[in-house]
């Protein structure tokens, strides 16, 4: 559906705050917004992403800090942002199982504080990054549509991401904070450094470039809705300014399924990795055998159209890995005190869900 939208006009003169701006989605969003907005303020504690991932641009200000640190929150709101993109989170499923209290504090209290300050500041738009795996549970029919909601969730991450949506509803109805809830599905693309709790695609690429077998948890027949980061950024920017998005929730996805086994074989072929794949038991919380989202509501509300072919997006991601290999290899976080080769062979990648 065609929606009248000109980012250069819509973001002209705006100051935009992006929490989690060092991450894969956040860094790409920062770069895109900086092209059209007056200023971009990035708040990130650099726990999950390196400093070099933040675009170094004249109109981008970086503040290193946590969304639980009220001093840092006051610092970024002192810059009087008009629009807030809240992407910072305690990511993701397995990490939240291992550290549920940290997950609750960051994804619960951190989100609440940002909304409170946004009300005080009179923010024009608050865009909340939710997660498709956090709302629909394991019993939802495909394609996943926004009107379906499950209370049978499998991880603290899923619970606190839903909590953020519920807080968004409260602040919209009670405080009239103009909120938008965007639900991501299996984002991939340039900017995501591999690691113990990261998504499956960067981990697969990293292991393949190391010449190691790619671990598949399950049968390999499982599918996920892999969405290129550029398409998500386009959807977020539309959500940040279009009036039709206010108070709504919608999926930002590709609307297509890819088998995990096919993904592994494609990456091995693209990297020349001869080590193949290895099988691992499915994690207890990993209850979904298939994922495919409907993007009909996002298309109707904001004109969202995921245009990137999976093969093209994967090639862009591989190119980013090759161009930045030394920095990526140094930053890959698979846990202290364990040799990289052993950790690479034993860690179970997170992100078939996230």
Image (cartoon, grey):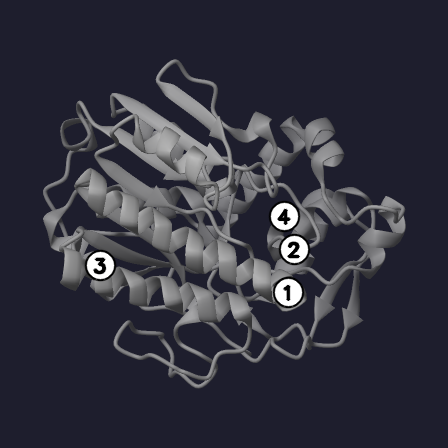
Residue wearing tag 2: 197
Cα–Cα span, label 3 and label 4: 35 Å
Q: Give the secondary structure at mark 2.
A: loop
Percent x, y of residue 86: 37, 46
Question: In front: mark 3 or mark 4?
Answer: 3
- Assess disc 2: are there few (<14), some (14-19) or many (≥20) residues with their C-alpha within 10 Å of its C-alpha: many
Q: Is residue 223 in view from this perspective? A: yes
For marks 3 and 4 on the same chain, the one whose residue lies earlier in the sequence: 3
Spatial CA distance of label 3 from label 1 is 29 Å
Q: Residues within 10 Å of mark 4 (few under 14, many from 20)?
A: many
Classify mark 3: helix, strand or loop.
Answer: helix
Which one is closest to the eye, mark 1 or mark 4? 1
- Looking at the picture, how far across and down is residue 24, in whole percent? 51, 41
Q: Which sits earlier in the primary sequence, circle 1 or circle 4?
A: 1
Q: Which image quarter holds the N terminus?
A: bottom left
Residue bearing the label numbered 1: 94
Which residue was labeled with disc 3?
Answer: 171
Vertical order, 202 against 215 (above or below):
above
Which residue occupies 55% across, 37% down? 45
Q: Nearer the viewer, residue 265 or 213?
A: 213
Q: Is residue 52 left or right of residue 33?
A: right
Nearer the observer: mark 4 or 2; the answer is: 2
Q: Are marks 1 and 2 in contact (CB under 8 Å)?
A: yes
Comparing labels 2 and 3, the label whose residue is closer to the camera: 3
Compare marks 4 and 2 and give the one earlier in the sequence: 2
SS at mark 1 in the image: helix
Counting labels gives 4
């Amino acid at each position: 559906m065609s929606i009248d939208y000109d980012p250069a006009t819509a973001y002209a003169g705006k100051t935009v705050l992006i929490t989690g701006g060092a991450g894969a989605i956040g860094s790409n969003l920062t770069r895109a917004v900086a092209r059209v907005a007056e200023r971009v303020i990035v708040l990130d504690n650099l726990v999950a992403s390196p400093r070099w991932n933040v675009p170094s641009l004249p109109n981008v200000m970086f503040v290193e800090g946590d969304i639980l640190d009220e001093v840092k929150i006051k610092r970024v709101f002192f810059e009087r942002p008009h629009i807030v993109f809240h992407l910072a989170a305690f990511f993701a499923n397995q990490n939240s199982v291992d550290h549920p209290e940290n997950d609750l504090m960051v994804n619960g209290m951190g989100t609440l504080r940002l909304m409170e300050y946004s009300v005080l500041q009179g923010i024009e738009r608050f865009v909340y990054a939710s997660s498709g795996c956090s709302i629909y549970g394991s019993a939802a029919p495909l394609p996943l549509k926004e009107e379906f909601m499950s209370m049978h969730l499998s991880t603290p991450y899923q619970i606190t991401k839903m909590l953020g949506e519920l807080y968004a509803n409260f602040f919209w109805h009670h405080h009239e904070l103009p909120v938008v809830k965007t639900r991501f599905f299996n984002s991939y693309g340039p900017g995501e450094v591999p690691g113990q709790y990261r998504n499956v695609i960067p981990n697969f690429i990293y292991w393949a470039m190391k010449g190691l077998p790619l671990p598949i948890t399950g049968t390999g027949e499982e599918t996920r809705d892999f969405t290129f980061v550029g398409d998500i950024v386009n959807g977020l920017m539309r959500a940040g300014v279009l009036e039709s998005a206010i108070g709504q929730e919608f999926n930002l996805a590709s609307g297509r399924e890819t088998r995990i086994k096919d993904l592994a074989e494609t990456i091995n072929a693209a990297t020349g990795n001869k080590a193949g794949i290895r099988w691992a038991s499915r994690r207890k919380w990993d209850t979904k055998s298939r994922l495919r989202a409907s993007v009909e509501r996002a298309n109707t509300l904001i004109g969202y159209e995921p245009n990137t072919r999976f093969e093209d997006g994967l090639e862009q991601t591989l190119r980013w890995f090759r161009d930045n290999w030394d920095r990526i290899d140094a930053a890959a976080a698979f846990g202290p005190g364990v040799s990289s080769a052993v950790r690479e062979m034993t860690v179970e990648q997170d992100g078939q869900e996230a």
